[in-house]
Image (cartoon, rainbow, N blue to C red):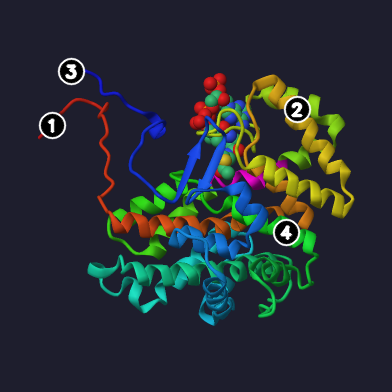
Amino acid sequence: MTEPDIKKGLAGVVVDTTAISKVNPETNSLLYRGYPVQELAATQPFEAVAYLLWNGELPDAAQLADLRATERAHRALAAEVKAVIDLIPLSAHPMDEVRTAVSAIGASDPGAGGSVLNAGGSPAENLERSIRLFAALPAIVAYGQRRRRGEDIIAPRDDLDYSANFLWMTFGEEPDPVVVDAFNRSMILYAEHSFNASTFTARVITSTLSDLYSAVVGAIGALKGPLHGGANEAVLHIFDEIGSADNVVPWLDAALAEKRKIMGFGHRVYKKGDSRVPTMKAALDTLVEHYGREDVAELYDALESEFVARKGIYPNLDYPSGPAYNLIGFDTLTFTPLFVAARVTGWTAHVIEQAGANALIRPLSHYDGVDERHVER
Ligand code: ACO
């Protein structure tokens, strides 16, 4: 029998079409609905990019105002969701908390799971659910960080846009525009990236006609891993281990001798550099200047140049975003939940797209276990 051509990890396999984003590693570009992500990050509020991902076009002023009004109306953490979060031990990873909170929101949506036969929902219902999750996640993430610090929940502010309000609910201080801008850019850069592991997970779940919340819960589980979203948290652990730029060479000698993976470097698709890194690095630079933390930039540059020189493997988005979130004041454990708050826009756009042209995702496997045998009687 001929051996099948197995693509481990589905590497290089094109499984479907998508009109949401285009990743081109050859030209090092990433387009959301045709727009370069760098242009969107430089010019748009995150709400407008969310609208673009869901609807295919950037909003006009009235459409943006409408989305913002809906987002503001659903910002506050629902009492039942807060009660569920409060039951989770503080020792749990915040990604488990976010995953459970989204599951609780799904369980209290009367239309989502009532009948298995219509659990998928209509495109309009799913768009509404997407906007509500997008609106609810900042409160979940912000409250998670606050409760781990022993601080009280902070109510959202109606006079602030998405990014400024997110920072307000986390820190309880009016954020500086420089910080809001850097944070907004990070949200846009994290929003969407075609068939990455978590998005593919969401599409697999959707393909069974399950509901949008289940798809997002599954995607959060996939994102948690350090080979995917968990890497932004892992980058900060590495920075903490290294300490300062002058320790990079001995640290890297030891890490590579132990065959450790250096988190924040490498990418399944981009082999010559992640298209999102220059934009996020520029945002990090503004934060370094704002907070007067040149030591962070020195460590960043030293590790990057040393690792690229030795291995020819380039940084991915998590490399600049980790230290950027640290400078803003987020706890390291909160970094991957921030990724969830951003990527929920891409995930839900893919849920709607998958449901609109569905085929059950069910690949084959090549059996290499023991030959047929029988129970002895
Ligand atoms: N540190 C050290 N070596 C690396 C790294 C790294 N960060 N990345 C790749 N390599 C090496 C591998 O060890 C492997 O070497 P080998 O051929 O000698 O065994 C080779 O480069 C190929 O790497 P693979 O892991 O097979 O490539 P793959 O495409 O499967 O991996 C991945 C991509 C998982 C992202 C990998 O680069 C990695 O583990 N990076 C660290 C985790 C990380 O930063 N993830 C974030 C992804 S981007 C995002 O979610 C925004």
Left/right of residue 198 with respect to residue 334 in the rendered view: left
Element assignment for label 3: loop
Q: Is mark 2 within 8 Å of ligand 1?
A: no
Query: Which residue corresponds to the image point at 59% horizontal and 28% vertical from the top-left?
Result: 272
Quarter of image, res 127: bottom left
Q: Nearer the viewer, residue 69 or 323?
A: 69
Residue 37 sits inside the magenta stretch: no
Q: CA distance from mark 3 to mark 4?
A: 59 Å
State which tag comes first along the sequence, 3 or 4.
Answer: 3
1 or 3: mark nearer the eye:
3
The residue tagged 4 is: 181
The residue tagged 2 is: 305
1 or 2: mark nearer the eye:
2
Q: CA distance from mark 1 to mark 2?
A: 59 Å
Element assignment for label 4: helix
Instruction: Check the image and report above or below for 308 versus 244.
Output: above
Magenta segment? 225-237
Element assignment for label 2: helix
Q: Is mark 4 within 8 Å of ligand 1?
A: no
Residue 230 sits inside the magenta stretch: yes
Disc assigned to residue 374: 1
